[in-house]
Amino acid sequence: MLSLFNPTVAWITTRATLGRKRALLFAIPAVVLIVVTVALRASRPPSRPWPSHVLGTFGFSVLLPLTALIIGCSVLGAEIDDGSIIHLLATPVRRSSVIMTKFAVATVLTMIFAAVPELIAALISGGGDTAPVIKITPGSPPVVIPGTAVNSTDFAIGLFVGALVGAVIYNAIFVMVSAATTRAIAVGLLYVLVWEALLSNFVSGARLLSVSHYCLGIANGIAHDVSLGAGLTVLTSVVMGAVVTVAALALAVNLLSSFTLKGEPA
Amino acid sequence: MSETPAGVIHDLGYRRYDGPRLGRAQIVRALTWHSFRSSFGIGRGVKAKIVPVLACVAMCLPAFVNAFGVARGSPRLFGYDVYVPQLRVVVLTIFVAAQAPELVSRDLRSHVLPLYFSRPMRRGDYPLAKYVALTAACLLLIEVPLLILYVGTIASAKNGHGVWAETRALIPGLGVGLMWAVLMAAVGLVLASLTGRRAYATGIVAISCFLTWTVSELLIQAEGGITSASAGARIGGLFSPFNILDGVRIWLGGTSPGEDANPGHFGPLYGVVAVLLLAACLGGLAARYRKLSMS
């Protein structure tokens, strides 16, 4: 296990990723999430299902993938881009170890920049209630069943756990993408915009292959909130998530093993 | 060579050229045409054509579906002024994010700007040519599906009255498309010209367009959706260029349900913000190339 994690590579990667001006970009989506949550919290009682929409839909299909995209593509992609990866690959560090180390660093950074803000925003939002149901039976006055309060701690923890899992899966995918193509950010964006944000919310069959729905499934397993709109059960989410992560990492190791440095892409 | 204007390097030390010099206007025209072609990947390799072609196909598909639907007797499926709002936003985001860096970042990256500016060409001409080209490209991407929608619908029209009604509905739709192209090309170019690395330029454009759009949608949704009349829902659209455009459309009299709640008396605010945003983007673009170091 130790051979899969190289502390020196981890240290260099962390420093290279956080040491540039670009690192400020990582924080923007998180700041947006918290500002929106605070604004909505201040303007209305938490009785509508907005916390689930903000934190579930926005958090899991926009904030988390975009943060993971920037971080996951820059841990390996930046080095491939400027050609300095050749120095790393020339050292007797195993390629699998390079991938695993960079993946671990990216995951931890994503957790800090996306999962922790998600937890903070969830705690600020205070959970909220499920939507009230209005039952109309012909011949009698409509009955309003008030929404049940979602346990606010469960809600926050559920979203946090979902975001942690999401950080792992997304980063495995984006590290794989940046090993596969020099246009990693463009390909990753296309995937996030078209697949995660558009298709998986309209085509129900796409859910089974959508990372944001794995996260929602896991979050819902703890939070038990109907308005999260989770389409998958916890078991399916965990199994599919694990399959996707392992497959992506295996593919990434395979791609980097046969890596050849190409010319300048841009 | 005696008529060569001073301060212009024509003799680069290579082969002599004694033909006519076409001057500034022709340079700008050529640069615009070249940029317009390359924004669809024409004259480039197959790889450069993937995104533009996919974007055009995705935009035109609903219009063709409509032609079949109308032929079987159903009414027109999509409005000319809103035309599948979410699809249009996503496709336009991807197109601008992919092609705006193609136009400006490559030149920054390969340091060819000194070559451009050593021609009889002013500093403002370069961004102007790029902007006109990208606007025209976006316009084509937005309006062609509308025209297909129009032709597909009137092909099944029963009488002249039906054709006239469709034409009257089409014209504001084309106007909305023009508004979209003018604003989004400016937003895309100014963001893309920030960096010479195409990957990061794409990221910056796409993330800022997409993030602001989702935030706007989220605020409108949380404030009661597009039918709501609360102040929050009415100003919720001000956070994203796409929603500002939709707000302006409703303010100017559009009635089809789109992305925004009816801005009501905040309508003029949408108009002002749209104009300010456009001015800021174009000003930023001009300033970017005025202060550009020649290295």
Image (tube, coloured by chain):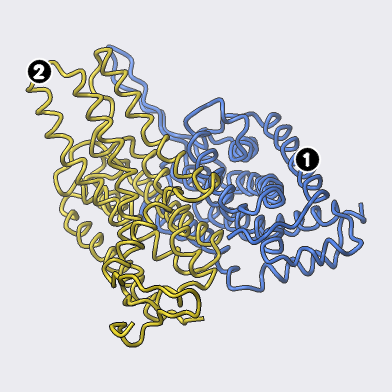
Chain colours: A blue, B yellow
Give the image quarter of residue A24.
Answer: bottom right
- Residue B291 is situated, as x and y percent measured from the top left of the image, at 40, 81
Residue placed at 83% from the left, 61% from the top? A89
**As displayed, is residue B264 above or below residue A21?**
above
Q: Position of residue A181 (x, y in %)?
A: 66, 50
Task: Look at 59% across and 56% down and name the residue there.
Answer: A67
Q: Is B196 on the left or on the right of B184, as rendered? A: right
B82 lies above or below A253: above
For the point 33% across and 39% down, the residue is B85
Amino acid on which the number 2 mark rests in the picture: Asn
Classify the position of the N terminus of chain B by image quarter.
bottom left
- Numbered label attached to residue B159: 2
- Specify whether A219 is left or right of B31: right
Disc marking residue A246:
1
- The amino acid marked with disc number 1 is Val
Crowding at label 2, few (<14), some or many (≥20) Cα neighbours within 10 Å?
A: few
- Give me the C-alpha separation between circle 2 and circle 1: 62 Å
x and y percentages locating residue B46 in the rendered image: 54, 44
Instruction: Give the secondary structure at mark 1.
Output: helix
Camera-near label (2 vs 1) is 2
Viewer-proximal residue, A200 or B286? B286
